[in-house]
Image (cartoon, grey):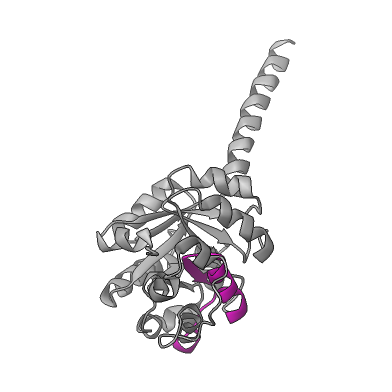
Amino acid sequence: MFKNSILDIWKSGKAAINGWLSIPNSFTAESMSKMGWDSLTIDLQHGINDYSTSISMLQAIANSPTIPFARVPWNEPGIIMKMLDAGTCGIIAPMVNNKEECERFVSYCYYPPLGQRSFGPIRAQLVYGSDYIQNANSQIITLAMIETKEAVDNLDEILSVENLNGVYIGPADMSLAYGLKPQFDVKEDPVFSNIKLIVNKAKEHGKIAGIHNGTTQYAKEMMALGYQFITISSDYRAMSSFAQNIVKEMKEIKELKESSSY
């Protein structure tokens, strides 16, 4: 039976720790999947991934207990259904601004009678078994991104959508929407006030709240607020920041030696 372990984590009241895959590479995905992430999200919106590169990444992740998600490029049925058919167990949809858009998003993810997903789980059925069709509607996770003023204003209506699992904050776009520079780990109002509002509203509606974080310290603060889907950095950011720190440290040593030689 197809079973999504992220749902069990949430039922226990705990937070799922989510990794982020921006690099279109199966070895990177395989390496990340061995690190202990509860889930990994393939980013098709701002990452360098597309549907074709995602297949080998999903195959690599399948060799671990990590649950695969996808952040799709847009709230559009074609790519949502193809990523589900390919074997993702959760979909994050960007720029969901109102109830109608959220209802459309949710409908693309579930088979009738809950939605309008077309049948053809070519890889999902191979990986999750012949009874996939009987279990998919209860195991697929839907997260609508809250990133704009319009979405915040319509938050209660969005959270009222039946079968939506929760919402996911895009802090960079939300910062832009309120005249701030795009950034993670926001502490400025009104964005920080929105972050606290969203998690409280999600709890009221019996939904999950998730957020993308730049650091573990901020991520811990978000968990303390009640966020239960916690993304930290990404494969690309982790690689580049670690490499930058190495280069900086070594150049400082080199410069110190050169200055001491005079």
Horizontal arrangement in the rendering, residue 9 relative to residue 67 (left or right):
left
Q: Is residue 55 above or below residue 205?
A: above
Q: Position of residue 97 (x, y in %)?
A: 50, 82
Please tell me whether residue 261 belongs to the stretch shown in magenta.
Answer: no
Q: Is residue 29 above or below residue 262?
A: below
Most foreground residue, 84 or 77:
84
The quadrant in which residue 230 appears is: bottom left
Residue at the image point whose x is 63% and y is 42% from the top: 240
Most foreground residue, 162 or 245:
162
Please tell me whether residue 90 belongs to the stretch shown in magenta.
Answer: yes
Most foreground residue, 170 or 128:
128
Horizontal arrangement in the rendering, residue 208 relative to residue 44 (left or right):
left
Q: Position of residue 57 (x, y in %)?
A: 60, 54
Q: Quadrant of the C terminus?
A: top right
Query: Which residues are the magenta region?
Result: 76-101
Q: Is residue 47 visible?
A: no
The quadrant in which residue 194 appears is: bottom left
Q: Is residue 149 above or below residue 44?
A: below
Q: Is residue 185 above or below residue 125?
A: above
